[in-house]
Amino acid sequence: MTTIDVNSLLLQMRRISAQTEMPAVRGVGEAAPVEKGTFGNLLKQSIEGVSQTQAKAAEMSNAFERGDPGIDLAQVMIQGQKADLSFRAMNEVRNKMVDAYKEIMNMSI
């Protein structure tokens, strides 16, 4: 069993967040109005991404079981592993968030 590098995962989430916060350039000196992303939106997008990955894995697995042409076992297994890894990463992030919440709640003011 492999361990998930939580720091690397958080760094990737920060990069994605930074990319969504950069304004799109319209012309010289003009920037399009951009709504700043919140942590909640980023978390929601991440969860939706995991859900889509799992749905795609299930769809490919069902297609392989039906014997659809163009779907081979290697593709099905890779997609299944992607879904498993993304779900485990999401659980690790959730666990870190719960730990941080508990630590904050135990702080004295």
Image (spheres, rainbow, N blue to C red):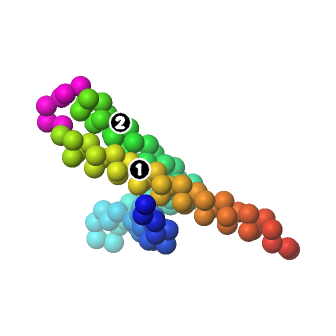
Amino acid carrying label 2: it is: Ala
- Residue carrying label 2: 58
Task: State the residue at coordinates (47%, 58%).
Answer: 89
- Residue carrying label 1: 84
Q: Which mark is residue 15?
A: none
Q: Quadrant of the N terminus?
A: bottom left
Specify start and end residues of the magenta stretch as a single range.
Answer: 66-71
The answer, for residue 18, to whether it is visible in the render is no
Q: Residue 105: x, y in percent?
A: 78, 65
Task: State the residue at coordinates (38%, 48%).
Answer: 83
Position of 106 relative to 69 (above/below): below
Q: Residues within 10 Å of mark 1 (few under 14, many from 20)?
A: some
- Indicate the secondary structure of the residue bearing disc 1: helix
Amino acid carrying label 1: it is: Asp
Image label count: 2
Position of 43 relative to 24 (above/below): above
Task: State the residue at coordinates (26%, 42%).
Answer: 76
